[in-house]
Amino acid sequence: MKKKWYKGKVFVITGASGDIGSAVCRAFAPLGMRTYLLDLPNPAIDGLVEELKELGAEHVEWFSMDLTNKEQISQVLKTIGEKEKNIDILYNNAGIGSKCSITNNGSFEEYRKIMSINVDGMWLVLQAALPYIGRPAPTKKHPDRREGQLIFSSSSAGKTGVPYMAAYAMSKSAIIALANSIRVEYKIQNHKIDVITVVPAPADTKFYHTSEMIDWINSYKKRGLLFKFVKTRDIAKRVLKASRKRKKEIFVPRWWKLLDILFAFSHHLIGNLLIKIENQ
């Protein structure tokens, strides 16, 4: 996509004020889009709205939205859709995680909390946004064609699994499967809707800066330079580039794509690496 394509288009993002979400918003703001931030109320929102306006966003508006509230999700997306008529880019970014698995006695309630936000919430957002995704881009052959983008935040955990974080890994794997399915569905329907999946390595976010993750973080960092935490601004830059180049799936950093390739050939090799990180 050329830069001029974005001017005046509608950009909607969930989990907007989080570390990755806010970094992505800052990367897209200079393009002059009409930006809608969807998130729970928190002290960072007002400052982010003003910052994005100063960076060049044509319009910035925040809506309070709880991904476990079906009615609220429906109402928020309907309000945006009816106002703007189209949603050109919908970024499904919101998510949570914890050390919840079967063998460490993770509760069903914690598992359901993760899945309800990371998977069920994303499903509900997509359902509510469906009538507005993309804008008309008809051709003689396909008069009903629409053009736009869906972007999904997944994780390398969704590719390999992570010891004692099964619920989180399951949710991120489900996101990859959802994106892969929708991508083909839009192609079958002859729409020009790009579906982009973002697969980052562990990033320097609040998710990892919790008491239950301290030991894991220290062990991960001991694996060497290649295992340093990814900066959120680097993820944001790659997301913007993926949008402009209409990519299908991106890894951050790029070399993490090797994990996906190696996993296809050797579950044993990747499994041993994960065990070493956990037992370091």
Image (tube, rainbow, N blue to C red):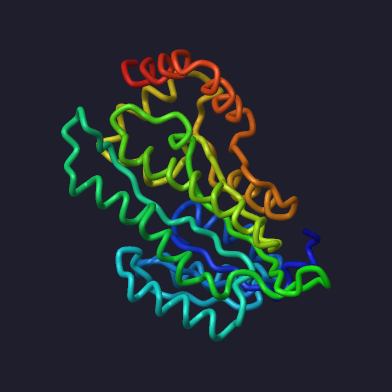
Q: Residue at x 64, y 33 (%)?
A: 254
Corner quadrant of residue 188: bottom right
**Nearest to the observer: residue 219 or residue 244:** 244
Corner quadrant of residue 219: top left
Report the residue that reaches farthest toward the right.
Answer: 140
Q: Residue at x 64, y 72 (%)?
A: 57
Report the residue that reaches farthest toward the bottom.
Answer: 83
**Nearest to the observer: residue 183 or residue 17:** 183
Q: Residue at x 63, y 50 (%)?
A: 239
Rendered position, 175 above or below 130: above
Q: Residue at x 54, y 80 (%)?
A: 81
Rendered position, 93 above or below 8: above
**Residue 43: where, in percent of width, then height?**
37, 67
155 left or right, relative to 106? right
**Nearest to the observer: residue 65 or residue 184:** 184
**Residue 64: where, in percent of width, then height?**
38, 73
**Residue 37: where, in percent of width, then height?**
49, 69
Rendered position, 168 above or below 91: above
Rendered position, 243 above or below 257: below
Quarter that holds the C terminus: top left
Quarter that holds the N terminus: bottom right
**Residue 245: where, in percent of width, then height?**
75, 50
